[in-house]
Amino acid sequence: MKRTQETRWRESPAYGPRFFLSMVFALAAFAVVTYLSSGSLATTAIQTLICAVLIQVGYFVAVLFLVRRTARARKADFEGGARGASGLDKTKTQVPVSMNKPGHSQS
């Protein structure tokens, strides 16, 4: 079975630490602009919380998309490279025929 090309997670758009840091900066900028436009701490807090939830939903959808794309690529590689025999069939050990006969341990 041919392995799919490994991607470096740090180069991936869904790399966790980079996403978290970007999200904190985006939320801070959003909170500052919201406070300057509304002048209310309560409104700023509620709108920033809603923005944070929407960003998290977007991140979750992006991760699902990346996992689905990787699974499809692996499935295509598996089906394309192993016609006729599955990967499990290739790794099975061959048991001698005599082991399958009754009384094989009495010899």
Image (cartoon, rainbow, N blue to C red):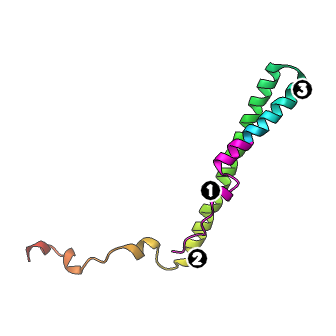
Q: Position of residue 96 (x, y in %)?
A: 24, 79
- Point out which mark residue 36 bears: 3
- Give residue 45's quadrant in the image: top right
Question: Who comes first in sequence, dot 3 or dot 2?
Answer: 3
SS for callout 2: helix
- Point out which mark residue 67 bears: 1
SS for callout 1: helix
Mark 3, residues whose alpha carbon is within 10 Å: few (<14), some, or many (≥20)? few
Q: Kindly identify the amino acid type of the residue bearing the numbered disc 1.
A: Val
Residue extent of the magenta highlight: 1-22
> Is residue 69 toward the left or the right of residue 39 in the image?
left
Q: Position of residue 6 (x, y in %)?
A: 60, 66
Question: Who comes first in sequence, dot 3 or dot 1?
Answer: 3
Foreground residue among 94 and 101: 94
Residue at 79% across, 19% down: 42
Give the number of the mark in front: 3 or 1.
3
Vertically, is 107 above or below 32? below
Residue at 73% across, 35% down: 52
